[in-house]
């Protein structure tokens, strides 16, 4: 128990003194997870809306695959990405393994099924009459899609929040493909594992509290977006 | 409902465009500086990540070492320099006095060290550094060998600060004069015990600055280190599992395996010692006693060097550890000690991790000193014939540096608060010193 209190105090100290190592880890965490989230949004939201709006053969299969993807254990994703980016793998010549890029790839793969799955569900939840109505009023396909996405915005925001939550807290994949290299690929979660292994429980808790605070701030920012950008 | 054919096409192409844009973003990200990745848009962005590691002070050259000059990591002995073509140049100092110096043209040295770049740093033994554009280095710019055997740079026509006494290093670099710019990234896969003990943090900055390298440590178990090495994903390994190391080299994955150091394993357990093994000198007998009394034993269970050693001792007892009392954890040494502490069980730990953790544990050393508990570490370079992309030259520099008497002395000097050395140097050079 003592460690938790010590950890909370240490977390404040680390932030107040702008500990350079912690700031660096924090910056890398944001950079990796933020970039991964951006990529998975770019792929996930359009894919999710498409699956939610259209009927076509094989749609069920794709949906089932997507739902499976939502439950993929991160460490399995990490292992796949590792084997693909390994020098003995098909993309080994890129030299991405043990760099932040490998971590971004892994996190994108983890979060995009979540984002498209939740987007699809929320788009499907929009009243089908709205579409017919818009169509009868002469709206183009693009306008209909935009109107439906706007209607489903809460669900889309939840999708993005879920995607972000899944990767900011993820440790198995980034440990495997990043290697937890000090000053290069060490993010908050892998730093927590390392400090726990070293028996520095208070420092590990401090980093955990910082991770929570970061996640909280990011979610607040996204909720603020919900009110503005999509709510025309 | 009706979807027009054109509408469908629009949607498809929209999707395709998005996928294309993401792909483009990814590739452009690949071409940029390896550490430059687009900033996140969603979360509050922070300042760009600072330089990876603080550049450490250059460490002093060993006085006994025959290398007198280091050009981008390639060492030259006095004999090497004497074997090269010498030129004589006249240098007139600011007082109008002209002296004739003889020595080796800097351009020849850079060529011999296969060094290229746009700027040159001339570094003296005391850390003084003078920088010049390589375009300004002429045939008359030399490293002169003075009467007392020391080296100095002589650049006739150059400013006074370029005439550096006691030169020990030349660094050619691209773009800026920042020597970290061109640092070679060397991936060292190693065990958690070397990394968690702090030894590498203590040793590596010396290598990084001396060889203009950036050693990146991937700390996993010996088993995973060897697997990473087998896939060619590391450049050099520092591990402790001799039979597996020998197999690794025999299979053609590794070259240049060298002894580095050793520490020893200790059998730790609760102070109450339910198996009654305290003070035993034979680890196998103690293990047998633990099995016999069914006392909790926590195994690393992760194919690490420590795990291999533990299994070897169980094999020596003639039995296999099975039952409720034997917990295979699949975790690193630190985590295993934590679990052992909670379970009040026994475990086999390397002394380094034990020393760094013992203050927070209610365990104590019960058995130590049995020769079977000897834990030698070896360094192996990944075979460049197998994986041409590895940094073979830097890996070979690393092995030479790690086994040098100077670095070995630093290993001996790395002590725990209790005054015990965490690792005992044991390289060939150290044994023959």
Image (cartoon, helix red, strand yellow):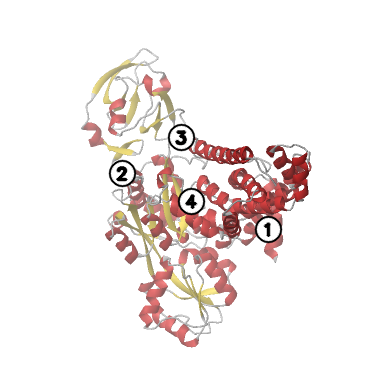
Residue linked to disc 4 = B201
Residue B207 in view in this figure: yes
Tell me the chain of label 2: B
For the residues labelled 4 and 3, the Cα–Cα distance comes to 21 Å
| Quadrant housing residue A8 | bottom right
- Specify the subunit that label 4 lies on: B
Q: Nearer the viewer, mark 4 or mark 2?
A: 4
Which residue occupies the foreground of this view, B25 or B355? B25
Q: CA distance from mark 3 to mark 1?
A: 37 Å
CB atoms of marks 2 and 3 within 8 Å: no
Q: Residues within 10 Å of mark 2 (few under 14, many from 20)?
A: few
- Chain letter for mark 1, please: A
Drawn side of residue A12 relative to residue B208, left or right: right
| Residue A198 position by quadrant | bottom right
- Disc 4 crowd, CA 10 A, few/some/many (<14, 14-19, 20+): some
- Nearer the viewer's eye, disc 4 or disc 3? 3
Name the residue carrying label 3: B181
- Residue drawn at (57%, 51%), measured in percent from left and top? A107
- The residue that mark 2 highlights is B65
Please state the horizontal and vertical placement of residue B417, each as a whole percent of the image: 52, 60
Q: Earlier in the sequence, mark 4 or mark 2?
A: 2
The quadrant in which the C terminus of chain B is found is bottom left
Query: Looking at the image, is mark 2 or mark 3 earlier in the sequence?
Result: 2
Pair 3/1: label in front: 3
Reading the image, the residue beneath label 1 is: A7
Q: Chain of mark 3?
A: B
Q: CA distance from mark 4 to mark 2?
A: 24 Å
Tell us which disc is closer to us: 2 or 1. Answer: 1
Is disc 3 placed on a helix, strand or loop?
Answer: loop
Closer mark to the observer between disc 2 and disc 3: 3
């Amino acid at each position: 128990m003592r460690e938790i209190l010590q950890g909370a105090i240490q977390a404040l100290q680390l932030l107040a003194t702008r500990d350079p190592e912690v700031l660096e880890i924090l910056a890398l965490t944001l950079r990796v997870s933020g970039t991964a989230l951006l990529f998975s949004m770019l792929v996930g939201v359009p894919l999710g809306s498409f699956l939610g709006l259209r009927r076509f053969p094989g749609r069920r299969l794709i949906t089932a695959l997507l739902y499976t993807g939502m439950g993929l254990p991160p460490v399995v994703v990490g292992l796949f990405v590792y084997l693909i980016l390994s020098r003995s793998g098909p993309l080994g010549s890129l030299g991405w393994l043990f760099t932040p890029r490998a971590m971004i790839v892994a996190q994108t793969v983890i979060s995009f099924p979540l984002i498209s799955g939740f987007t699809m569900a929320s788009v499907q939840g929009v009243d089908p009459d709205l579409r017919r109505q818009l169509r009868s009023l002469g709206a183009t396909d693009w306008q209909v899609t935009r109107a439906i996405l706007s209607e489903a915005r809460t669900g889309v925001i939840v999708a993005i929040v879920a995607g972000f939550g899944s990767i900011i807290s993820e440790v198995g994949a980034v440990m495997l493909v990043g290697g937890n290299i000090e000053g290069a690929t060490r993010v908050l979660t892998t730093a927590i594992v390392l400090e726990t292994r070293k028996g520095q429980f208070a420092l590990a808790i401090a980093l955990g509290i910082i991770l929570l605070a970061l996640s909280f701030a990011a979610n607040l920012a996204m909720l603020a977006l919900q009110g503005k950008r999509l709510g025309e | 409902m009706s979807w027009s054919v054109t509408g469908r096409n629009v949607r498809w192409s929209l999707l395709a465009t998005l996928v294309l844009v993401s792909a483009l973003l990814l590739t452009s990200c690949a071409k940029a500086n390896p550490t430059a990745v687009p900033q996140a848009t969603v979360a509050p962005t922070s300042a760009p990540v600072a330089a990876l590691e603080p550049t450490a002070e250059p460490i002093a050259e060993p006085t006994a070492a025959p290398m007198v000059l280091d050009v981008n990591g390639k060492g030259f002995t006095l004999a090497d320099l004497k074997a090269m073509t010498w030129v004589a140049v006249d240098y007139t100092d600011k007082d109008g006095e002209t002296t004739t110096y003889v020595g080796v043209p800097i351009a020849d040295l850079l060529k011999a060290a296969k060094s290229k770049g746009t700027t040159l740093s001339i570094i003296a033994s005391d850390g003084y550094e003078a920088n010049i554009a390589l375009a300004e280095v002429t045939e008359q710019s030399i490293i002169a060998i003075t009467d007392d055997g020391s080296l100095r740079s002589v650049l006739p026509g150059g400013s006074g600060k370029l005439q550096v006494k006691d030169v020990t290093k030349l660094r050619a670099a691209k773009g800026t004069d920042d020597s970290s710019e061109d640092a070679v990234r060397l991936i060292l896969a190693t065990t958690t015990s070397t990394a968690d003990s702090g030894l590498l943090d203590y040793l590596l900055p010396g290598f990084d600055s001396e060889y203009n390298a950036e050693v990146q440590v991937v700390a996993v178990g010996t088993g995973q280190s060897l697997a990473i090495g087998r896939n060619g994903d590391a450049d050099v390994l520092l591990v402790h599992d001799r039979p597996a190391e020998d197999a690794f080299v025999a299979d053609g994955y590794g070259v240049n395996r060298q002894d580095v150091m050793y520490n020893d394993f200790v059998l730790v357990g609760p102070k109450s010692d339910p198996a009654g093994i305290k003070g035993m000198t034979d680890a196998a007998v103690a293990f047998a006693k633990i099995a016999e009394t069914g006392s909790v034993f926590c195994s690393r269970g992760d194919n690490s060097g420590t795990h291999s050693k533990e299994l070897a001792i169980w094999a020596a007892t003639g039995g296999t550890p099975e039952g409720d009392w034997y917990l295979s954890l699949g975790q690193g040494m630190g985590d295993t000690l934590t679990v052992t502490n909670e379970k009040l069980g026994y475990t086999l730990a390397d002394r380094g991790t034990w020393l760094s953790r013992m203050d927070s544990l209610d365990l104590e050393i019960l058995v130590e000193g049995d020769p079977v508990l000897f834990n030698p570490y070896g360094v192996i370079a990944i075979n460049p014939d197998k994986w041409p992309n590895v940094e073979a030259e830097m890996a070979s520099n690393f092995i030479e540096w790690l086994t040098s008497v100077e670095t070995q002395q630093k290993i001996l000097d790395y002590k725990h608060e209790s005054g015990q050395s965490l690792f005992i140097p044991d390289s060939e050079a150290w044994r023959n010193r």
